[in-house]
């Protein structure tokens, strides 16, 4: 090792899902199969490109205002970032600075470990139970903060608000972050608890239900004090994080509530139909409340199925990690895309 290498921060990075450039059926990264709201397309076409020579609004004021009105909170309660990954990273940097370990599940969004390692934050990962459910009592221990997704990824399981509140109520001395990337396909949001618990931060995204993964828009909602701390950290790091186009399109995406709700309805409808198709093929899966299904088959190796699908131009997600080595995560695509996948699986299984 050369001398300067001793002082380089080395981390094991997050591995994103494949983004094939050729035309495939892409069911591996939980993107929305439908286009963004019509207003988004219109905004891009009519955008005043002369404004691109100017810095964007560092506060993302118009988008913050639109989100505050949509969720019936004050603008001082909203923090906007470049995708929820940016927001969550800023939360780790800002709030998890204790010598005590941060707690998150052993099977969850794998970026949590990356941020913890990057910022040198100690952490512990209580095991999900045999049904991949949170064990709320495991979060009663002393800690430096708590974070978990609801619904969880990759398990797709939604925990009722009573379970979420129980965990928050047992951790009043630390920050609790509920990562709700998939909440729009599930049930009640923890946003209902913001006024009751001053240590709660809820993080959501435009990448899933709003069909804007390519725009990178995420946000946190909390009380004004915690949002101020986030903004202080952001302005110490990079003031101009969100570009002009993203801010403009984000506003239009929030405004079209009817389109947003219709897309969610279609995805849930296809999801529930797909569960029936998987069941007929002999798959077992968790009761998904997200826009993906976490499935395994007792008679087929998950990696072999993954490779066979990929060879057919159908991409799903496979990890081969401990405890989930026989599971695949299948994004809910259009009904046509899902039918193509099932047609291949029936042929592959000779059904």
Image: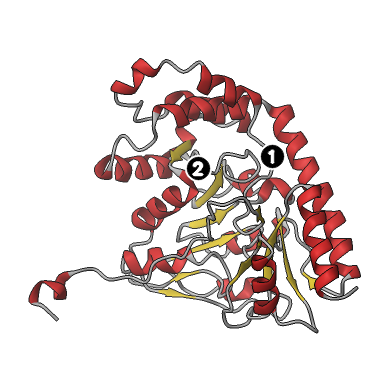
Left or right of 99 on screen, residue 212: right
Q: Dividing the picture into quarters, in which one does residue 318 lie?
A: bottom right
Q: Note whether 73 is above or below 200 in the view shown.
A: above
- Identify the secondary structure beneath mark 1: loop
- Tell me the element at label 2: strand
Residue 97 point in image, percent of width and height: 33, 62
Residue 90, position in %: x, y?
38, 51
Q: Say which quarter of the image contains residue 133.
A: bottom right
Residue 274 in sight from this viewpoint:
yes
The C terminus sits in image quarter: bottom right
Give the number of the disc on residue 344. none
Q: Quadrant of the N terminus?
A: bottom left
Of all residues, the one furthest to the left in this rendering is: 3
Point out the frontmost of discs 1 and 2: 1
Indicate the position of residue 291 as horizontal and vertical percent values.
Answer: 70, 53
Q: Which residue is mark 1?
A: 34
Quadrant assignment, res 59: top left
- The label on residue 218 is 2
| Foreground pick, 21 / 217 | 21
Q: Is residue 133 visible?
A: no
In the visual, does 50 lie left or right of 291? left
| Residue at 64% over, 66% down | 310
Q: Residue at x 74, y 41 (%)?
A: 264
> What is the CA distance from the residue labelled 1 to the residue labelled 2?
19 Å
Q: Residues within 10 Å of mark 2 (few under 14, many from 20)?
A: many
Q: Nearer the viewer, residue 251 or 273?
A: 273
Residue 344 in the figure: left or right of residue 8: right
How is the rendered protein coloured? secondary structure
């Amino acid at each position: 090792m050369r001398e300067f290498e001793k002082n380089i921060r080395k981390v094991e990075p997050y591995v994103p899902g494949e983004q094939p450039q050729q035309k495939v059926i892409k069911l591996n990264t939980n993107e929305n199969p439908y286009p963004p709201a019509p207003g988004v397309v219109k905004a891009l076409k009519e955008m005043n490109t002369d404004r691109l020579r100017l810095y964007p609004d560092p506060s993302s004021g118009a988008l913050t205002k639109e989100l505050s009105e949509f969720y019936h909170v004050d603008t001082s309660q909203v923090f906007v970032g470049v995708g929820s990954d940016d927001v969550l990273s800023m939360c780790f940097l800002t709030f998890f600075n204790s010598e005590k370990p941060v707690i998150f599940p052993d099977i969850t969004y794998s970026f949590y470990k990356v941020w913890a390692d990057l910022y040198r934050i100690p952490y512990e990962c209580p095991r999900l139970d045999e049904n991949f459910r949170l064990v709320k009592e495991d979060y009663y221990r002393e800690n430096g903060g708590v974070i978990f997704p609801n619904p969880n990824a990759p398990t797709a399981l939604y925990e009722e608000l009573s379970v979420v509140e129980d965990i928050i109520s047992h951790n009043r001395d630390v920050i609790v972050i509920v990562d709700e990337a998939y909440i729009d396909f599930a049930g009640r949001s923890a946003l209902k608890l913001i006024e009751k618990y001053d240590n709660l931060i809820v993080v959501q995204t435009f990448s899933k239900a709003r069909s804007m993964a390519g725009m990178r828009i995420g946000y946190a909602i909390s009380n004004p004090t915690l949002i101020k701390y986030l903004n202080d950290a952001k302005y110490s790091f990079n003031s101009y994080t969100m570009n002009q186009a993203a801010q403009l399109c984000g506003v239009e995406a929030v405004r079209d509530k009817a389109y947003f709700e219709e897309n969610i309805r279609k995805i849930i409808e296809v999801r529930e139909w797909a569960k029936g198709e998987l069941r007929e093929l002999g798959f077992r899966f968790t009761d998904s409340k997200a826009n993906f299904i976490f499935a395994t088959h007792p008679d087929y190796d998950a990696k072999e199925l993954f490779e066979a699908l990929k060879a057919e131009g159908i991409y799903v997600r496979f990890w081969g990690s401990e405890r989930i080595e026989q599971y695949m995560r299948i994004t809910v695509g259009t009904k046509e895309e899902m039918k193509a996948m099932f047609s291949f699986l029936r042929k592959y299984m000779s059904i």
